[in-house]
Amino acid sequence: MSNEELTKTSSANSSEQEESLPAQKGDISLQKERLRWRNILARVVLFLIFAAGFFFSVIPVGRAATRALLLLPSVLLASQPGVVTMTEEPVRHVKKTITSSNGPVYLDVYEPAVAAPPIPGGREGMVVISGVGDNRKEPQLVNFLQALAHTGVVVMLVTTPTLIQYDLSAADSDGVVQAFQTLERWPGVGANRVGIVAFSAGDVLACFGAADARIRAKVAFLTLFGGYFNAKTLIRAAARRALTVDGKTQPWNPQYVPIQVLANVIEPLLPPTEGPRMVNALSPAGMPLTPDELASFSHDTVTVYHLLRGDEPDMVDSNLASLSQPLQALLDTMSPSRVIGQIDAPVYLMHDRSDQFVPFTESRDFAAALARIHHRYDFAEFGIFQHVEVKSGLNFWQLVGDGTTLFRLVDETMLPGS
Amino acid sequence: MNMLLLSLLWVLIGLLLGGLANGAKLRPASWGKQGWRVMLGIGMITALVTGWLATWLVGIQFSTVTVLWVTVVVLWVGSWVLKLRNQWDVQGHNNLS
């Protein structure tokens, strides 16, 4: 190519550029004018996606909501849907036994198998007390614990020999404190991100633990599902075989387990020859006490027998009042109502309205007492559970209705780790 | 396996957001007629890279929601910056001439 040709080509290119630049400028100004409704709609959709994404991944309340949304299907469906587990962390199970002042404490830890992500740092920890009996292999409970761990929580299921034997002891609260402190030191668990979750009668130990001076300032939350508030009102409901709800009396027929637990708790304070006999007589397969036996037994044994058997519904208050001082003191000791003033953590209460193990009025009383002392709390009643397990055969709308309420409580429980 | 499926999900999200950005007329005119493909490509790559980074930084539970907002920001702010640069280039050229 000659110099002349090169000069021609160069001048042609520069004149093209000069022509195209004003055209580009014109394009930019025209673009603003040419925005149509569909372009604006697309921008609105993009902005909403941005806002939702930012809220659910950056803002703590939103992060808690994300984890609650991941957890909820597993709780409501009592299994872990594959679509949900795809976005969850792999989990490992560790068994451990520690010692407390009341004997061994069995710990089953379910934790994410990978290290905690750098943001926000430490993981949330939950001490879970599942109530009486040995529930460590209960499918719904194991599913719940695994689902929690999948969402990034380190979960520690706590049980003791006393609980396994369908009994309660206030001394076991030391075991809860020891478990809490163990979880606080667990690798990956963040400081002040450990809370306590209790089901059924486990709420007694949870409350005693949360009120213990060694950990009360460190407990991030206390979530109680299907627990009782006061042993005397629980016995009153069992003895009357009825509840008073909003001023109206409705029948309530308890299952055997709460009767068994109450009998086991009271038995050590009864004469040694009478206690075991009374416990056996109250069991479903047991023979009722004969009139001769009732005539020969102590006043406490006979009164407790009638209260738990529910055969003197019109004499409940007088029977309760006539119990000896040690028994009255025991029932007061075994009541969470005794320690609510010493609990610092926010309390989240849940109860099923058709609960046949612990009447839902117990949680109502608990909530009312917390409101009276201006303690931070939330309370929700459900219809989709039987005691603490999800009922089968529920329809979609029942799941959606109660699921929304459950989401609120789970969201609050997930907040400390978010 | 999970990460492979998630990566596919993120690529799909990136394509969808790139498509929405095209629909929102965010791409600079200077990209010409093939610019919509560039937009889809940017959406896809941003979503994929963000997904992996978010999994490491904030955990797998938050990776997909992080992908959503970061990809929108990159597409929107990125195209806005490019348009601005084009404008400056034009203005600079006009001032020079």
Image (tube, rainbow, N blue to C red):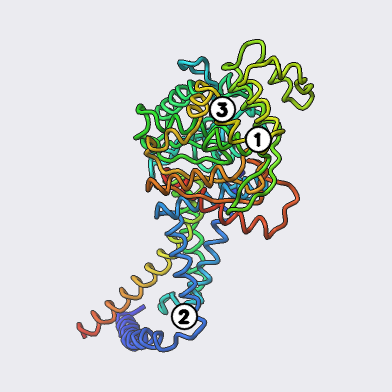
Quadrant of residue A253 in the image? top right
Disc 3 versus disc 1: distance between alpha carbons?
Answer: 14 Å
Taking the image as shown, residue A286 lies to the left or right of residue A203, namely right
Residue drawn at the location 75% of the way across and 50% of the way down? A393
Pointer 1 chain:
A
Taking the image as shown, residue B88 lies to the left or right of residue A307, namely left
- Is residue A250 shown above or below A106? below
For marks 1 and 2 on the same chain, the one whose residue lies earlier in the sequence: 2
Residue drawn at the location 41% of the way across and 85% of the way down? A31
Between A46 and B80, the one lying in front of the other is A46
Where does residue A82 sit, x and y in percent of width and height? 66, 47
Disc 1 versus disc 2: distance between alpha carbons?
Answer: 67 Å
> Would you name the residue on which mark 2 appears?
A40
User: Seen from this angle, which residue lies furthest left?
Assistant: B96
In the rendered image, residues at marks 2 and 3 fall on the same chain? yes
Where does residue B60 sit, x and y in percent of width and height? 50, 46
**Label drawn at residue A322:** 3
> Would you name the residue on which mark 1 appears?
A239
User: Seen from this angle, which residue lies furthest top?
Assistant: A273
- Label 1: which secondary element: helix
Q: Residues within 10 Å of mark 1 (few under 14, many from 20)?
A: many
Between A14 and A236, the one lying in front of the other is A236
Does the image show residue A139? Answer: yes
